[in-house]
Amino acid sequence: MSKTETEEQRDGGDATEGKDLGAAGAQLSTAPREELIGGPSLSVVGWARWFWRQLTSMRVALILLFLLSLGAIPGSLIPQNSVDELKVQTFKQAHKTVSPVYQKLQFFDVYSSVWFSAIYILLFVSLIGCIVPRSWQFVGQLRGRPPGAPGRLTRLPAYTTWRTRAEPEQVREAALAILKKRRFRAHTVGDAVAAEKGYLREAGNLIFHIALIVMLVAFAAGQLFKSEGGKLIVEGDGFSNTLTQYDDFKSGSLFSTDDLVPFTFKLDSFTGAYEKTGPQRGTPRTYEAGVTYSKGGGPDKKSVIRVNEPLVVDGTKVYLNGHGYAPVVTVRDGRGKVVFNGAVPLLPIDNNVTSTGAIKVMDGYRDKNGKKDQLGFQAFFVPTFGGAGKGTMFSQFPGLEFPVIALTAYHGSLGVDAGLPQNVYQLDTSKLTQFKDAKGEILKARLLPGEKMTLPGGAGSITFEKEVREWATFQISRQPASGWALTGAVAAIVGLVGSLFIQRRRVWVRAVTGEDGITVVEMAGLGRSESPKLPEELGDLALTLNAEAPTAPDSSDVPAEGAEK
């Protein structure tokens, strides 16, 4: 059956209208348009183009970002060699079945593994490939002007119309002024005013993706050039920022020792005050280290380091990590000669600073056969003694109120002459023999400040002096790109907020003379996405414009010529 002329006109009008609406909504997004093309050629160039299009698509970028976050999970749950090799060894000994699998999958070195680096680099390339064309398109849109109105505005999501006796030119001028006052980019195209607003949405989208690149670069630079080390310092001792001064030290693969900032600091005092009563007894109230520091041989300066309030010297941060006690002991040989005197740092094992450690004396004593033995003492210290009469002792409070030290004495070889690294806080008893008292029992003693323990066989004595110093552990770290990473994170949040909450929309105002000589005003709006705010905004604009071009009375309300009033 053939179509009637009216149907053909209607179909043709619908096609033209669809074309007009497509033009009206064009370029509301800077996302690259996908063209309908055939499958990629099997040539190398064709496959390369296809792969590049896939890699630089937003879908693949989101997948890679998800894989990157997924890949970071084992790095958070499994000990890493870059953080603590001792924990890695302990984990391997405790999990001998899965450790070989983890080793092959590089789970102990996640952030430097081949697979994590591949995801990282692909994400970096993908983001750049997404951003560059979108940026050029966005610049082109900023330089362009809003498109003209579609042929029929009635098909747009938000629409209103009224009749006015004002001239069409007056309506368009009033509409142009109102829209510009509302910060729309507006201009007159034919019989209509075209306006657009919400460019910050696309700007926020681009800022978000650029910020992600900045963060990726900053994190990579931070890992490659970072340095981080720890140092335990007793009150009165100091530290110089050189490699040999660190107790432990780790750095990025591109780090150079020349990058260490030349500075020194001395721990003048550590102040720790604790809650003494109530359910929060023992909770720290004051926890700070007073230091004197100088940079590059400059003048000395005083500072106080607190938790989360580091000392900053040219980008290097000194954090306060921990605290403990170092009782001062004196060891004498059988002739009364002092062979050791100093503060011995002991490591805490609970919240009340119950501490353990070792005292090692290289110059010990000579036994009856003239053989020189070294001395070692296993030490157990409590700042506030508890457990009297119970066979064990423990600390009741982290403050230094009733200090007691328990010692067990050994003699023999400490094993330090073998040239192998040894933990200074642990005593290797494999080549040591315990002292025994006159009854043949193991020699042990609990000492108060000022008391001493005499060793049998003229081996000498050890005295717990009336002084207990405090020590603090510090983390000295340098993260070169941390400022860039923070800036990128803030910019990403700002860009994301802009892209989520700013709506890009277009408004058209058409004013033409109707068949009866009265001006017909049409207003319509189109947004990038459906939003209940678009009709509200259009209604507000219509009310403002209606005040300038008021609605004309309906012809039925106007009396005919010659009729009675």
Image (cartoon, grey):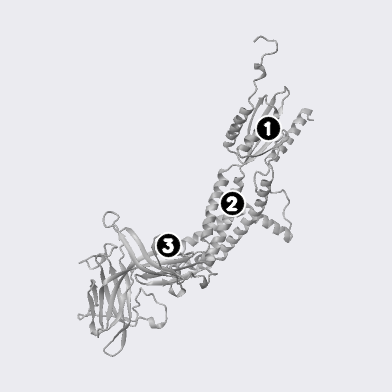
Could you say where residue 554 lies in the image, as x and y percent from the top left?
Answer: 65, 20
Label 3 – label 1 distance at C-alpha: 63 Å
Residue 310's tag is: 3
Which of pointers 3 and 2 lies earlier in the amino acid sequence? 2
Q: Nearer the viewer, residue 404 or 194?
A: 194
> Height in image: 476 above or below 1?
below
Furthest-top residue in this view: 564
Could you say where residue 208 lies in the image, as x and y percent from the top left?
Answer: 57, 51
Task: Give SS at disc 2.
Answer: helix
Q: Which residue: 60% across, 59% down?
A: 124
Label 3 – label 2 distance at C-alpha: 32 Å
> Height in image: 510 above or below 68?
above
Read off the residue under disc 1.
Answer: 172
Which of pointers 2 and 1 lies earlier in the amino acid sequence? 1
Which quadrant holds the N terminus?
top right
At label 3, counting other C-alpha atoms closer than 10 Å, the crowd grade (few under 14, some 14-19, many 20 or more) is: some
Which quadrant holds the C terminus?
top right
Label 2 – label 1 distance at C-alpha: 36 Å
Furthest-bottom residue in this view: 369
Tell me, yes or no, if residue 132 can be seen here. yes
Q: Type of residue at label 2?
A: Ile
Read off the residue under disc 2.
Answer: 207
Q: Which residue: 58% across, 57% down?
A: 213
Which of pointers 3 and 1 lies earlier in the amino acid sequence? 1
Q: Nearer the viewer, residue 70 or 420?
A: 420
Task: Give SS at disc 1.
Answer: helix
Could you say where residue 195 lies in the image, as x and y percent from the top left?
Answer: 66, 38
